[in-house]
Amino acid sequence: MSDDELQIDVVIPTQTRYLDLIGSIAEHIGRELQQYSGDREAFAYHLNLVLTEATSNAIRYSGHNDPSETVRITIQFIEDELTIKVYDHGQGFDLEKIPIPDLDHPKEGGMGIFFIRSLMDSVSYRKGEDVNVLEIKKKLKPNPKVP
């Protein structure tokens, strides 16, 4: 993927069986994004983890058990920044009130936002009347241009 701009838009039912698909898309982007100059395998793994966690949370906390409900994921790369947005129709949450987990005594669950914050550059959340948006950004270092 050598273009300066890329946008992927995926809409899935609120069912966890689609998480592997979302993770695969993220990994493919991480491996193929030529503008990224770091370890692409590690980057692919990080994107898979971040996108799977964000989507899983949107599905889990959407408050809907209706498979006709959806989660929308957009992945956009412009110049040297990757932006991921996860849209859901749930009750929402306060990102600032999510506690840092006790890493000495980890519990099952509750680590998703911590991982996302640790691996990405910025994380924000907007609760709207009809839709909530988790926005995740990662600055990328462009490869040096070869003459």
Image (tube, rainbow, N blue to C red):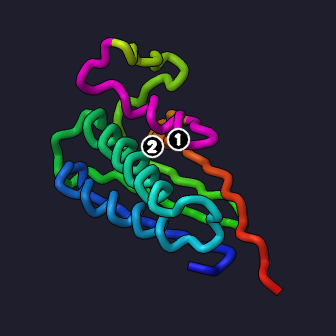
| Residue in the image at 64% along x and 64% along y | 37
Crowd rating for badge 2 (residues with CA inside 10 Å; few <14, some 14–19, many 20+):
some
Which x, y percent locates residue 27? 40, 63
**Count of numbered circles in the view:** 2
Vertical comparison of 62 with 74: above or below: above
Q: Is disc 2 in contact with disc 1, using a CB cutoff of under 8 Å?
A: no
Q: Amino acid at mark 2?
A: Val
| Residue in the image at 41% along x and 50% along y | 51
Which x, y percent locates residue 21? 28, 63
Q: Is residue 53 magenta?
A: no
Element on which disc 2 rests? loop
Q: Which numbered tag is attached to residue 66? A: none
| Residue in the image at 62% along x and 65% along y | 36
Report the quarter where the C terminus lies: bottom right
Residue of label 2? 131
Q: Nearer the viewer, mark 2 or mark 1?
A: 1
Vertical comparison of 19 with 65: above or below: below
The mark nearer the N terminus, 2 or 1, is 1
Magenta segment range? 105-124
Q: Amino acid at mark 1?
A: Leu
Crowd rating for badge 1 (residues with CA inside 10 Å; few <14, some 14–19, many 20+):
some
Q: Is residue 118 magenta?
A: yes
- Viewer-nearest residue: 25 or 7: 25
Vertical comparison of 109 with 56: above or below: above
* Residue furthest bottom as drawn: 147
Element on which disc 1 rests? helix
* 126 relative to 104 in the view: left or right: right
Residue of label 1? 119
- Marks 2 and 1 sit apart, C-alpha to C-alpha, by 25 Å
Which x, y percent locates residue 2? 62, 80
| Residue in the image at 50% along x and 41% along y | 134
